[in-house]
Image (tube, rainbow, N blue to C red):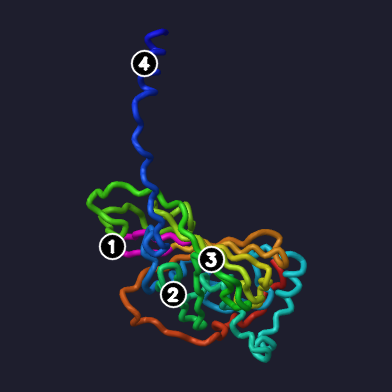
Amino acid sequence: MLALFIAFLIAAQVPQGPPPPPQPVLAPRAAAPFDPTGYWASAVTEDWQWRFVTPAKGDFIAVPLNTEGDKLAKAWDPDADVRNGNQCKPFGAAAIFRLPTRVHITWVDDSTLKMDFDLGTQSRTVYFDKSKPLGERTWQGHAIGQWIDVPPPQPPRGGTADDPSARRGAAPEAGGRGAARNQIGGLKIVTTNIRAQYLRMNGVPVSEKAVVTDYIDRVPGPDGAEWLIVKTIVDDPTYMSQPYITSSQFKREPDASKWNPTPCELLPRVNQAAPLGR
């Protein structure tokens, strides 16, 4: 015991080196675990009857509407939307990633992303600065972004985050974050301050109190393809009994040759009326 005590005292007297210097704080653009920029096209592999067309009035299957939401969905009047200048209600932050659209993502500056959507000609600005003040309510709302699940820096091993040889992955699935996510970190976007809008083209309501949270991952697919997997959670205490969760896929395109901005117009409508309710 005496020998152990003496060894402890000797070790305690050994001068300790200075603490490691703090890691520099990188701007969000420099800290990005993956490159989200470029042109991305929606790949609709499920729920086409609610995404490629305007569903029949009263078709809100799988949407957890409460009594008030149910009532409003059944009372949808598309002509009134046109008269009141609300044609863009189905193209807001709650629904835009589920539509058959393309999205063009760019950096405005080192702390701000911009997402342009050609269907409905929508734009969402994503601020990484949480102190950014709210403006007026818009269809795309006030979006705050942050990188999440980013592993600590590792010593260089001959590859980079954007080098396919440095990553592994499988073809993306519709499960969203967790099922087909990358292993390098993701982008979380929380959107508030939206205008009252629609979750689907046929008037499924979303209130201005809703919070829309998007989780975006970039994953490699077969044949060198690159995908964005977008998990969207719409939490609306006014019209929903629980959050509504979807997962959407976007395939990277090489250029803007297929970019086709269009106005806010309803997709082709299902002619027959659906049974009201679920």
Instruction: Assess whether mark 4 and mark 2 are in contact (beta carbons under 8 angstroms).
Output: no
Identify the image quadrant of residue 49.
Answer: bottom right
Identify the image quadrant of residue 10.
Answer: top left
Residue pictured at 71% horizontal, 67% vertical: 239
Of marks 2 and 4, which one's residue comes earlier in the chain?
4
Residue matched to label 3:
144
Instruction: Assess whether mark 1 and mark 3 are in contact (beta carbons under 8 angstroms).
Output: no
CA gap between label 3 and label 1 equals: 34 Å
Give the mark toward the camera: 4 or 1: 4
Of marks 4 and 1, which one's residue comes earlier in the chain?
4
Quarter of the figure with the C terminus: bottom right
CA gap between label 4 and label 1 equals: 60 Å
Instruction: Assess whether mark 2 and mark 1 are in contact (beta carbons under 8 angstroms).
Output: no
Residue matched to label 1:
223
Residue matched to label 2:
103
Q: Nearer the viewer, residue 237 or 130?
A: 130
Q: Which residues are magenta?
A: 216-228
Label 4: how many Cα within 10 Å (few below 14, some 14–19, many 20+): few
Of marks 4 and 3, which one's residue comes earlier in the chain?
4
CA gap between label 2 and label 4 equals: 65 Å
On the image, the x and y values in percent for residue 188 come to 50, 60
Give the mark toward the camera: 4 or 3: 4
Label 2: how many Cα within 10 Å (few below 14, some 14–19, many 20+): many
Q: Nearer the viewer, residue 160 or 222?
A: 160
Instruction: Assess whether mark 1 and mark 4 are in contact (beta carbons under 8 angstroms).
Output: no
Which SS class for mark 1? helix
Label 1: how many Cα within 10 Å (few below 14, some 14–19, many 20+): few
Task: From the viewer's perspective, tell me whether residue 98 is left or right of residue 56.
Answer: left
